[in-house]
Image (cartoon, grey):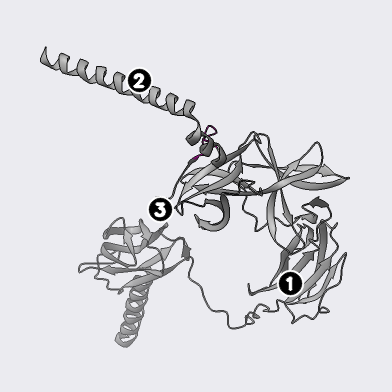
Amino acid sequence: MKKIKKIILSTILFFCLSLTTKAASFNMTASTTQVSPNGSFTIKVGGDCIGRVDLSVTNGSLSSNSVWIEQGYVSVKVTAKESGNVTIVATPVTGFSDTDANIYNPGSRSVMVRIAGITTSKPNKEPEQPKSKENRLSALKINKGTLIPEFNENQTEYTINLDANETEITLSGTPKDAKAKIEGLGKKELKVGKNNLEITVIAENGAKKTYIIYVNVDETPQIYLDYDNKKIGVVRNLDDMPIPEGFEQKEYTYEDKKIVIFEKGTLSLIYGVNQENQKNFYLFNQEKKEIMTKVQPIKINHLNLYLIDKTSENLDLIPNQKKIEEHEVTCYRFKNSENYCLLNAINEEGNAIQYLYEENEKTIQLFPDFLIKQEEKEEIKTNPIWYGIVILFSSVSFFIGYRVKKGEKNEKSK
């Protein structure tokens, strides 16, 4: 009988202890498994237990570092940092117990939340294919002329020769790789002479290849004018031509063809080339449609001069080639003077004028119209009337000068 009682008591005690163990619990959960950089989420800590729980966090911050649990759950806000994982650990402190005040030591609990933006490897992802480096043309076409040499995808320079009246050309081409892009196709305007056109093929990976097409438009003059028993062709390619200072470029129609003239004041100039392939400016009469003279625009001491092709009739003047301000000019030297010479020119009104140039000081001035010719000088020397005029003029000048100086002395003495 006693033995039976012991068995019954032992069974009741074990059953009570089992109920007590099952009744106590301690857990921690998170409101999410992933959070954005610098974002927030909440955790819940608690269970069927009583006591204080300390909290710690890595890669984040907590709204509270400890909570009191009393048969329930407490929420705590967690703020993540920019990247990585946020880990929170909850640890019961000494005195933690179950609901019957029995010491309960369940140990620490932890949760981890991933911060979004962290790339994770995907072992099953196929490797990316490298971008194409193909940057060649498979075809290049033009709407006029002939490519020299014939097109080859590896040949990058070509030449096209066109007639004088051609003003435009159209380029078309096809890339060898459909993923490549082409720049420089379409209709292109042409000027007289050499035109450099470029076509650039850009591969998928950004590599570039440039094809250059040199288009030569015949620049042979279309208009010829007579001057000095020679034919002067009006130059069409003006790329290397220095436009004279102050002149304005305009178009002029001559025999149904367009030519370029340069105007300033009443002057009209054309740029012509003679049979020896020498290029010069020429004075052009628009009304008569003819060349009047060759003109050489130069600048001496900041003075713009327009030298003309004129032969001096004075036998005392000797034509001489001089270099003035880097220009080779014809300057007519006096027989009795090595330093002075005359330059024949025209002004903006088209009137012929002469300039006196002094070589030592490199000065220039208008040659006065009242200066007499050499033969007139000889006449003055032998004419007694002129002697009288010179003596009278000198006497009057002396008397006036004397009176002026005497007046100055009187003023000073006062």
Vertical position of residue 91 compared to residue 332: above or below: below
x and y percentages locating residue 50 in the rendered image: 28, 62
Give the left or right position of residue 21, taking residue 201 as reference. Answer: left
- The residue where tag 2 is placed is 396
> Could you tell me which residue is drawn at 55 percent across and 36 percent down?
376
Residue 405: image quadrant is top left
Badges 3 and 1: C-beta atoms under 8 Å apart? no
Q: Is residue 369 magenta?
A: yes
Residue 179 got which mark? 1
To which residue does mark 3 refer? 360
- Relative to residue 104, is residue 299 drawn left or right? right
- Callout in the foreground (3, 2): 2
Q: Nearer the viewer, residue 410 or 354?
A: 410
Q: Which mark is residue 4?
A: none
Whether the residues at callouts 3 and 2 have beta carbons within 8 Å, the answer is no
Q: Residue at x 81, y 79 (%)?
A: 149
State the image coordinates of residue 154 (x, y, percent, origin top left): 74, 82
Magenta segment, which residues?
Answer: 366-372
Q: Secondary structure at mark 2?
A: helix
